[in-house]
């Protein structure tokens, strides 16, 4: 039989219409892998965090696929390195949602990139989990498909303030920040919080992070009778100058604040290792040793699996790996229990209650997509780092 | 308090003065105000830490290698960003070309080195305390530079040739002076002085890519205060700036210390636009 060009075109059009209406879709969907878009910063300035999180993420995906996948479907992690650049995060997000049609997004993994990419991911109707701290990154009305499995900045500041006021019992507090947006915003947010807890803020100031001499600031704090210093900055140079100068003044006031206080970069800039005494940065209860040097049972079991998998821990932090491990498992549980459409995934997450992550226990509701529990944000001893985790600061129970 | 103001103030002031001299040496040879001055200062700290701390070179070898890298950077600055725009100086295209090159240096340093401040090695086993090397090293470097430049410009033939092209490069060329080679040599010398500033000040300021813009600005202030082209004016202006900044740091503190510096800078420029040591430009009428 001779096939005319018109007949051939009609046939092709009919086939295309059949595919488009989804007659064969269930059969394809049953066998095809679940595509998770993943936006880590594996290179560039934020890459130390990104590389740590990536180790946990790869382990989780490997374990899920080795166990048979999700109802027989393997997870395909489609990775785009953001190179610590918000512009590249936006490009990567667009490529993943539009060209690769991913079912769900994990990341971006830092706030600068998430601020740029989250509106685009939301516009394309793709469910998203991210671990970024900036408060504005979740809003169930604006971004109904975006969920956070990490603390907010409010919770970070709240935990530090709680430690100073209720555990250290310091009533007179000095709060200092650098002049960056993060520093000044933290100062504006946390000073009223401290006052509402009943503390007296005896000194507050924003200082140029590059200022080589912070002694004048510390002398003013001392003269004001400060019983604790709370610096809000991610600049290791600024923080180390505060710690060095405090020690040189022979002033043993505690310094309590952001995680960078306990970072390797800060340590490298200290004039003497013992200057790190009485410095308490933020961390997370599930990833911290108690006073007897033990991790919580769930985390200890996880660390054993990390060791067996041959994952390097000495050059990173346990909470980064744990955080990376929880992301794909939250996604896998949603697809396993509810399905893989955006409505099914978000519908499941909206009802998650007490989900037992290694990094944190997650509870989401339709009104609140910040799932991390404030009580799991704690302070630790900066000079106690061992295999990626710190010891709880004095005063915590358990 | 007074000890801290004087020690930090003079040390910082010496670093600012050296960056001011870096601006001046480039300006004298080309009438170009190159924004790479602060970047050479930043690189002095970063390269010093790289050579001595990371690569394990002996201090003296690391010091010489850092200054040599500064000289090479100066030559590249002249070839890439100054020479192509010299014919149209009145359009001030050098602002764009040198600023763009300075930003490239800064970004490259951030990518290849680190965005975090890094420690700078202790060079000599002297200190801590008032006689800490972080205070006196920049001052010694500044004194040595000003004495060296005075000797070069007043006692050597090549120094006089530098002054000749600074005074009138058309006349200098007419006399047969190799203007282009002298300009390259001036830029190499500026690179050496800039990296010397950063190297000697790095224990105080740390090896940090973010020091570039800071030194660009605070190095410009002594030039504006002391008068464009006046090295003695830059030294006086730099030391005064360092002392004033540190005094403001103690008296008002926080962000107001920086504001105080800007206020004084603007007031001085309004009162005496040519700077304290500069001569008012004569205008033919």
Image (cartoon, coloured by chain):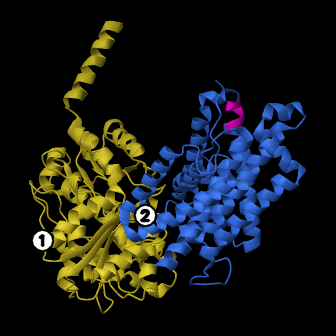
Chain colours: A yellow, B blue
Q: Residue at x 66, y 72 (%)?
A: B137
10 Å crowding of disc 2: few (<14), some (14-19), many (20+)? many
Secondary structure mostly seen in magenta is helix
Q: Residue at x 39, y 54 (%)?
A: A40
Q: CA distance from mark 1 to mark 2?
A: 28 Å
Direction from residue A277 to residue A122 in the image, left or right: left
Tell me, yes or no, whether the highlighted magenta stretch contains residue A323.
no
Tell me, yes or no, whether the highlighted magenta stretch contains residue B83.
yes
Mark 1 or mark 2: whose residue is earlier in sequence: 1
Label ID, residue A196: 1
Q: Is residue B220 above or below residue A300?
A: above
Secondary structure state at the residue bearing disc 1: helix
What is the chain letter for disc 1? A
Label pair 1/2, CB-CB below 8 angstroms: no
Outermost residue toward the bottom? A292
Residue B119 or A106: which is nearer the viewer?
Answer: B119
- x%, y% of residue B5? 50, 73
Q: Which residues are magenta?
A: B82-86
What is the chain letter for disc 2? A
10 Å crowding of disc 1: few (<14), some (14-19), many (20+)? few
Label ID, residue A209: 2
Q: Residue at x 46, y 88 (%)?
A: A274
Direction from residue A54 to residue A366 in the image, left or right: left
Direction from residue A44 to residue A206 in the image, left or right: left
Residue A32 seen by the camera: no
Residue A349 seen by the camera: yes
């Amino acid at each position: 039989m001779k096939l005319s060009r018109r007949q051939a075109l009609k046939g092709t059009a009919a086939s295309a219409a059949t595919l488009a209406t989804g007659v064969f879709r269930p059969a394809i969907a049953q066998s095809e892998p679940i595509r998770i878009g993943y936006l880590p910063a594996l290179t560039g300035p934020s890459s130390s965090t990104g590389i740590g999180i990536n180790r946990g993420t790869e382990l989780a995906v490997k374990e899920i696929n080795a166990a048979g996948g999700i109802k027989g479907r393997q997870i395909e992690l489609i990775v785009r390195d953001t190179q610590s650049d918000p512009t590249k995060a936006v490009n990567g997000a667009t490529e993943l949602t539009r060209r690769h049609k991913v079912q769900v997004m994990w990341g971006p993994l830092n706030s600068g990139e998430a601020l740029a990419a989250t509106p685009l991911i939301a516009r394309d109707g793709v469910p998203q989990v991210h671990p970024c701290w900036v408060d504005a990154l979740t809003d169930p009305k604006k971004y109904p498909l975006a969920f956070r499995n990490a603390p907010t900045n409010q919770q970070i500041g709240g935990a530090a303030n709680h430690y100073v006021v209720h555990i250290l019992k310091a009533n007179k507090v000095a709060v200092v920040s650098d002049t960056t947006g993060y520093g000044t915003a933290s100062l504006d947010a946390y000073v009223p919080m401290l006052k509402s807890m009943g503390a007296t803020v005896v000194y507050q100031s924003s200082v140029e992070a590059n200022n080589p001499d912070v002694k004048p600031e510390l002398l003013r704090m001392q003269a004001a009778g400060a019983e604790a210093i709370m610096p809000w900055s991610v600049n290791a140079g600024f923080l180390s100058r505060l710690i060095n100068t405090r020690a040189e003044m022979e002033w043993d006031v505690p310094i309590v604040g952001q995680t960078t206080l306990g970072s390797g970069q800060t340590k490298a800039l200290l004039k003497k290792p013992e200057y790190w005494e009485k410095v308490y940065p933020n961390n997370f209860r599930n990833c911290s040793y108690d006073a007897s040097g033990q991790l919580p049972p769930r985390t200890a079991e996880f660390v054993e699996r990390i060791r067996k998998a041959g994952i390097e821990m000495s050059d990173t932090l346990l909470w980064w790996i744990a955080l990376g491990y929880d992301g794909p498992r939250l996604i896998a549980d949603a697809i396993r229990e509810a399905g893989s459409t955006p409505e099914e995934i978000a519908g499941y997450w909206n009802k998650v209650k007490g989900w037992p992550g290694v990094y944190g226990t997650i509870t989401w509701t339709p009104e609140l997509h910040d799932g991390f529990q404030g009580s799991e944000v704690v302070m630790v001893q900066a000079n106690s780092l061992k295999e990626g985790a710190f010891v709880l600061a004095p005063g915590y129970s358990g | 308090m007074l000890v801290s103001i004087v020690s930090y103030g003079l040390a910082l002031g010496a670093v600012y003065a050296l960056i001011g001299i870096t601006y001046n040496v480039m300006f004298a040879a080309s009438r170009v105000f190159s924004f790479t001055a602060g970047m050479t200062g930043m690189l002095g700290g970063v390269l010093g830490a790289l050579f001595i701390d990371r690569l394990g070179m002996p201090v003296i070898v690391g010091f010489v290698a850092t200054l040599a890298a500064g000289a090479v950077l100066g030559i590249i600055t002249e070839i890439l960003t100054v020479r192509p725009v010299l014919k149209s100086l009145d359009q001030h295209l050098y602002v764009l070309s040198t600023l763009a090159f300075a930003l490239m240096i800064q970004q490259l340093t951030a990518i290849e080195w680190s965005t975090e401040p890094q420690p700078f090695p202790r060079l000599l086993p002297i200190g801590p305390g008032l006689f800490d090397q972080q205070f006196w090293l920049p001052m010694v470097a500044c004194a040595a530079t000003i004495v060296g430049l005075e000797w070069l410009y007043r006692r050597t033939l090549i120094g006089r040739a530098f002054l000749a092209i600074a005074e009138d490069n058309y006349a200098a060329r007419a006399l047969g002076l190799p203007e282009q080679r002298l300009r390259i040599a001036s830029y190499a010398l500026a690179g050496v002085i800039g990296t010397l500033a950063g190297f000697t000040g790095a224990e105080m300021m740390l090896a940090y890519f973010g020091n570039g813009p800071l030194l660009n600005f605070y190095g410009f202030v002594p030039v504006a205060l002391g008068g464009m082209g006046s090295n003695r004016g830059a030294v006086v202006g730099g030391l005064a700036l360092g002392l004033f900044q540190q005094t403001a740091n103690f008296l008002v503190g926080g962000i107001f210390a920086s504001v105080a510096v800007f206020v004084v800078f603007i007031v001085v420029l309004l009162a005496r636009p040519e700077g304290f040591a500069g001569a008012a430009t004569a205008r033919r009428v």
